């Protein structure tokens, strides 16, 4: 049975609703359980005892500390007229708090079982009119209009989700996100920090990131392996006028090799050629461009600036200190 559990990427299963009975994982029901004596649920709900498997590969760790949930909502500065987008509502611990203060909540949840529990709990609290649920992968879903994001997201989709939010089509005021602590640190890293990385550069170009608080792993059910942090991302009013394809290609090239300084990276002519290819600037007569334009990369990293002059040159200043940074991460 142990192997079976591992294969299914199952962490633990928690007391929730009878939905479990229809579930194909019925044979696992007798495994030792982590009882969901959830500090957030009332007696009535407790009486409807049953189990719901929580999956590691879906990041299903429920935040159960009321104090942390309240702080997240308070720090998000939600107005009574706001529509809040929540990614991964799970069983609705945070959703119920959001529904208390917002005009509307749009929750995007991939797991049908969670949606059923969520709808039931929300109905019991009389908030059903204020909630709309999109049962879809948040990375694929088309988000409706919203004012702000407040979410305890599945950590596995942190990078693409942050990118989708800050580079997406929906304008929003702020995104209060509960993230894996390590990920939050990378997001908050500054030029010159050993952790400075592509993610931080790309996000900082379009948004400001504020640290709010750390959250212990013990505040989740089941307890994950990692601690968490809450950050608030606020899109900048004005972002630099830059071709984003070129910018992403540039940062990809800058942070492509972990243990290489930018100076060393751009001493390589092939890196500059790669940069042009990535940014779709290279034309079919790449050979000619090589000689005429890329040649400036032959000498040292500083000459790279001339190559990118038309597009991102003015932004280089922001990451100047990276030139002496030794360890960098290329993940976005
Ligand atoms: C960390 S739990 C948070 C649950 C709840 N917000 C809480 O704080 O107790 C993440 C939730 O996101 C859902 N989820 C996982 N991957 C998702 C995806 N790609 N799109 C939408 N929801 C997802 C999981 O099913 C789970 O309910």
Image (spheres, grey):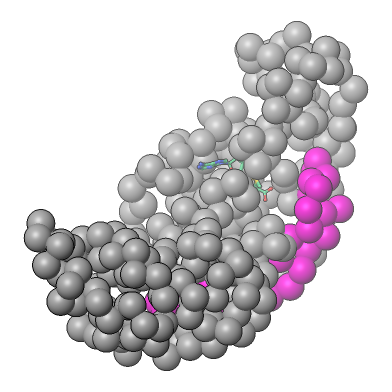
Residue 180, percent across and down? 69, 58
**On the image, which quarter does residue 14 sit in?**
top right
Is residue 149 something that shows in the picture? no
**Quarter of the image with the N terminus in it:** top right
Query: Residue furthest toward the right?
Result: 32
Dividing the picture into quadrants, the one containing residue 282 is bottom left
Residue lying at 46% horizontally and 72% vertically, measured from the top left: 265
Residue 315: give x, y in percent of width and height: 36, 85
Q: Nearer the viewer, residue 131 or 56?
A: 56
Left or right side of 84 for 37:
right
Residue 9: x %, y % from top left: 70, 28
State which quadrant residue 194 falls in.
bottom right
Q: Residue at x 83, y 60 (%)?
A: 216
**Range of the magenta residues?**
200-229
User: What x and y, as percent, mark residue 53?
Assistant: 72, 27
Residue at point 87% right, 32% down?
35
> Would residue 236 appear left or right of 156 to someone viewing this image?
left
Seen in the picture, residue 266 relative to 222 is either above or below; the reply is: below
The reply, left or right, for residue 23 in relation to residue 135 is: right
In magenta stretch: residue 209: yes
In the depicted structure, whether residue 128 falls above or below residue 332: above
Q: Quadrant of ligand 1?
A: top right
Above-or-below relation of 158 to 76: above
């Amino acid at each position: 049975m142990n192997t079976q559990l591992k294969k299914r990427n199952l962490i633990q299963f928690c007391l929730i609703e009878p939905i479990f009975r229809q579930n194909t994982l019925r044979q696992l029901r007798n495994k030792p359980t982590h009882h969901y004596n959830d500090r957030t649920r009332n007696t009535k709900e407790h009486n409807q005892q049953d189990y719901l498997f929580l999956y590691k590969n879906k990041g299903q760790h429920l935040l159960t500390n009321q104090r942390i949930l309240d702080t997240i909502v308070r720090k998000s500065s939600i107005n009574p007229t706001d529509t809040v987008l929540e990614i991964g509502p799970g069983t609705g611990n945070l959703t119920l708090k959001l529904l208390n203060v917002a005009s509307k909540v749009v929750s995007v949840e991939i797991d049908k079982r969670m949606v059923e529990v969520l709808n039931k709990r929300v109905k019991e609290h009389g908030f059903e009119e204020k909630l709309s649920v999109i049962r879809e992968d948040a990375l694929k879903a088309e988000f409706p209009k919203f004012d702000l994001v407040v979410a305890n997201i599945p950590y596995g989709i942190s990078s693409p989700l942050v990118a989708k939010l800050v580079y997406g089509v929906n304008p929003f005021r702020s995104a209060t996100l509960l993230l894996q602590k390590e990920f939050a640190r990378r997001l908050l890293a500054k030029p010159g920090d050993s952790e400075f990385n592509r993610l931080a550069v790309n996000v900082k170009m379009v948004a400001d990131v504020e640290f709010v608080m750390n959250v212990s792993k013990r505040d989740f059910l089941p307890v994950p392996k990692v601690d968490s942090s809450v950050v608030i991302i606020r899109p900048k009013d004005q972002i630099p006028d830059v071709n984003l394809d070129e910018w992403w290609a540039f940062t990809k090239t800058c942070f492509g090799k972990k243990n290489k300084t930018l100076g060393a990276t751009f001493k390589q002519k092939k890196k500059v050629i790669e940069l042009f290819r990535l940014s779709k600037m290279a034309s079919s007569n790449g050979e000619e461009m090589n000689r005429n334009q890329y040649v400036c990369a032959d000498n040292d990293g500083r000459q790279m600036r001339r190559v990118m002059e038309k597009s991102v040159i003015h932004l280089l200043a922001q990451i100047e200190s990276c030139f002496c940074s030794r360890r960098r991460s290329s993940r976005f």
